[in-house]
Amino acid sequence: MDTTKKKLISRRAFCKNLTIGTVGFATLAGTGYTRLSSGASLSDGTTKKIPFNLPRRAIGNTGMYVSVLGLGAGSRFWNNSHLPRELWEDYVHRALAVEGINYIDTAINYGSNQESEKMLGTIVQCYRNDLILSSKTPQRHYDGVMRDIETSLTNLKTDYLDVYLMHNLGQNGSETSLRQLENGYNAILKLKEQGVVKAIGFSSHSAVPQLVSQAVDHLDIDLLLLSTNNMFNYKPHIESIADRGVAVSTIKVMMPIEGQNPSQTGKTLLRGVLDLPVCSAVITHRTQDVFDSNLTTIREYAAEQGIDMYYADFSAQSQINDFTFIPSQTNFQLQQDKQRSVLSLKTVGPLYSNPRRPRTYALVNNKIWKEAEVTINVRYTDTLGTPDIIIPFAYQDEHHWCYAHISNRADNFHNVIMKVDGSNRYTIHTERTRSPLQTKEYYRIKLVFNADKGSVCVYCDDDGMQEPFLVASNATFAPGLVGLGSFDTLALFDNLEIHGKVTT
């Protein structure tokens, strides 16, 4: 078994994703359930959006973001398969279309007849573009995993999964070494290489910490789904796992109060998980009241922490109102490209001097970010010089701000992190490894910054977001606005996401 892990730890530990945070689901058993008045059918064949109204966290460096409250589709979900479809269907609709939960976790062995996957298969198609869909296999042999993935894709009526996990690492003590996982792991790795699944890993209720640690250090995995209050409590190990570049979601969060009504104890359990570097707490709620209580906990927590987010897909003209344009809105317009609506930087502004600085950009209004993770799709179309894209951050005013200048070449002015501080711009990065934007295709760029720590890391999907190509450490900059733009290049922008903490 090849145990050479494909991830470097040192820079990732420095640039690890901010634990910027969010918020499941419930079964309908019991006579006290009241049907939700969603006002919409899930079976009319239309595509439905999951609103961006709950904070989300990154699944490591996969480029995927999940609501910190995930919808668990275990026994309390599939045990309702005998109930009228509109009851549990309405509940899923509320979780996704109303509350903004975008992460569902299921498994092929949830239900003796795969009820969980089959029930979800009747629902998830209309949300598929916005949904992070995860399933699991209990198989440990290569062929068994390959059979299971085909069945799961059929059950869920999709041609790919966002996350695919080998279920129950440790198998209640019967698995003690990575060698026992070799054939199954090779299968899920092959599925990722083929693009059938986007991210891979393990779930576990019972594996000893040493086995989990070996998997983190020696296997190329993206996510662990770990119990916090069941057969084993992994909470003491989560920070170490995240520091080593593997994302963690949690299960069994509410196990200590199982069978009780919502209480401060439940809030304490959920908040205790949110304080950890986890991307989501996956919960199958027992009742609507429990669901409501957990949503309240999430929103209170987000408000206290100053957690905020912003998303623009540039599909509506009204999104233009979210931005301040420099020098003018006339430099930008919405247009169609590759069958989607994008923001086009169609003309560049005048050259600026006193101080010298970029000339055309757009800033997201009214949010002063002190730390954030900014991701955006970019494509340059024409240029007056060297192709370039900028991501402004820490913006105070035209004479005081920072920006990542991303280009297909590297010199004193291209592929750099710059600061404008009342005088001509100057570089603040401490490390530079490569130059993206080598073609006119779309690239996904990610910028992660923290004003308190003085850290900035810039990633590109040309290496799968694995390692930053620009790094600044011990820099000095203030909280400020965030945006997009260019120095002297015409460009297209799509799917801007900002997750972070704002000043209160």
Image (tube, rainbow, N blue to C red):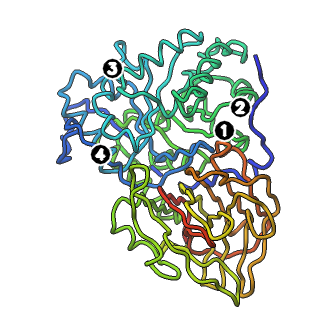
Mark 2 highlights which residue?
216
The answer to whether the residues at label 1 and label 3 have Cβ atoms under 8 Å apart is no
Instruction: Give the spatial CA distance, label 3 vs label 4.
Output: 23 Å
Q: Earlier in the sequence, mark 3 or mark 4?
A: 4
Crowdedness near tag 2: few (<14), some (14–19) or many (≥20) residues, C-alpha within 10 Å = many
Q: Position of residue 439 (x, y in %)?
A: 63, 51
Kind of residue indicated by mark 2 = Val
Q: Earlier in the sequence, mark 2 or mark 3?
A: 3
Circle 2 or circle 4, nearest the eye: 4
Name the quadrant of the N terminus.
top right
In terms of image quadrants, where is residue 355? bottom right
Secondary-structure class at tag 3:
helix
* Lateral position of residue 203 relative to residue 438, left or right: left
Mark 3 highlights which residue?
115
From what the image shows, is residue 175 above or below residue 459?
Answer: above
Q: Earlier in the sequence, mark 2 or mark 1?
A: 2
- Residue at (76% x, 70% y) in the render: 413
Q: Position of residue 504 (x, y in %)?
A: 52, 74
The answer to whether the residues at label 2 and label 3 have Cβ atoms under 8 Å apart is no
Mark 1 highlights which residue?
246
Secondary-structure class at tag 2:
helix
Q: Is residue 393 visible?
A: no
From what the image shows, is residue 422 above or below residue 492?
Answer: below
For the residue pair 378 and 177, the one nearer the viewer reads as 378
* Lateral position of residue 477 relative to residue 445, left or right: right
Q: Position of residue 176 (x, y in %)?
A: 71, 15
